[in-house]
Amino acid sequence: MGEAVPTRLAQQIQFVIEIDQLKGILRQTLLTDRSRRENSAEHSWHIALMAVLLAEYAPADVDVLRVVKMLLVHDLVEIDAGDTFCYDAQHNQSKADREQQAADRLFGLLPPDQAQELRSWWDEFEAQATPDAQFAAALDRLQPMLNNVQTAGGTWKQHQITKAQVLQRAAPIAIGAPALGDFIQHLIDHSVAQGYLRP
């Protein structure tokens, strides 16, 4: 960018340009109109807005702004690591290593103070040890479920996913957003009854 641009600004702009690549990372989940698969940037935006809209279902000690920050950075590592389909057992074995390496590179592009701050949000989301991270994870699990129901089974039908698999995948919702428990059970039971999920 030239010597006239201060180093800090140059690093920030480089990061902004780099993260544009997230728009090209396709996920398995279909858009609700079934026209195509969503990309990871769309997914991150969707669940960040869900955090604002569904904040009343978060446990009382959850900081929704911190949740939004986590949700906006949690999938940036997919720029390098790709999106790993949650039901792909083989590729999930190497997921953590691939994503750690990606986090090191991507957050390392930022000025040190911002690198530390954004990386801390990502690490917190991954660790799932705080109420904020647990609510963020609940929304991350809920959004694809909603899209699968709206697309008459979508990815679930394509990959012959079972009720037991979805129950296991949805387990963090009961931890991070217990107020949504009855809704999740209804959603799964409805999906089985409609043939969206294998019993």
Image (spheres, rainbow, N blue to C red):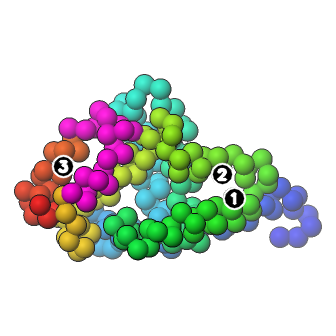
**Gap between marks 1 and 2 measured at Cα:** 6 Å
Q: Main secondary structure of the magenta part?
A: helix
Q: Considering the numbered disc 1 on the image, is that residue within a helix, a strand or a loop? A: helix
Q: Are marks 1 and 3 in contact (CB under 8 Å)?
A: no
Q: Which residue is mark 2?
A: 119
91 or 9: nearer the viewer = 91
Left or right of 22, for residue 159: left
Question: How many other residues sit within 10 Å of disc 1, few (<14), some (14-19) or many (≥20)?
Answer: many
Task: Tell me which label, 3 or 2, sits earlier in the chain.
Answer: 2
Number of residues whose C-alpha sits closer than 10 Å to that of mark 2, classed few (under 14), some (14–19) or many (20 or more)? many
Q: Quadrant of residue 92?
A: bottom left
Residue underneath mark 1? 107
Q: Taking 172 as reference, is 8 left or right?
A: right
- Farthest left residue? 193
Q: Is residue 147 above or below residue 176?
A: below
Rounded to the nearest angstrom, the CA distance separating label 3 from label 2 is 34 Å
Q: Residue drawn 25% across and 38% down?
A: 181
Q: Secondary structure at mark 2?
A: helix
Residue 9, horizontal then vertical, whole percent:
80, 57
Left or right, 174 with respect to 132, comes to left
Q: Which mark is residue 187?
A: 3
Looking at the image, is 171 positioned above or below residue 36?
Answer: above
Q: Earlier in the sequence, mark 1 or mark 3?
A: 1
| Identity, as a three-letter code, of the amino acid under mark 2 | Arg
Q: What residue do we see at 39% from left, 33% from top?
A: 58
The residue under the point 83% across, 55% down is: 8
- Part of the protein shown in magenta: 164-182
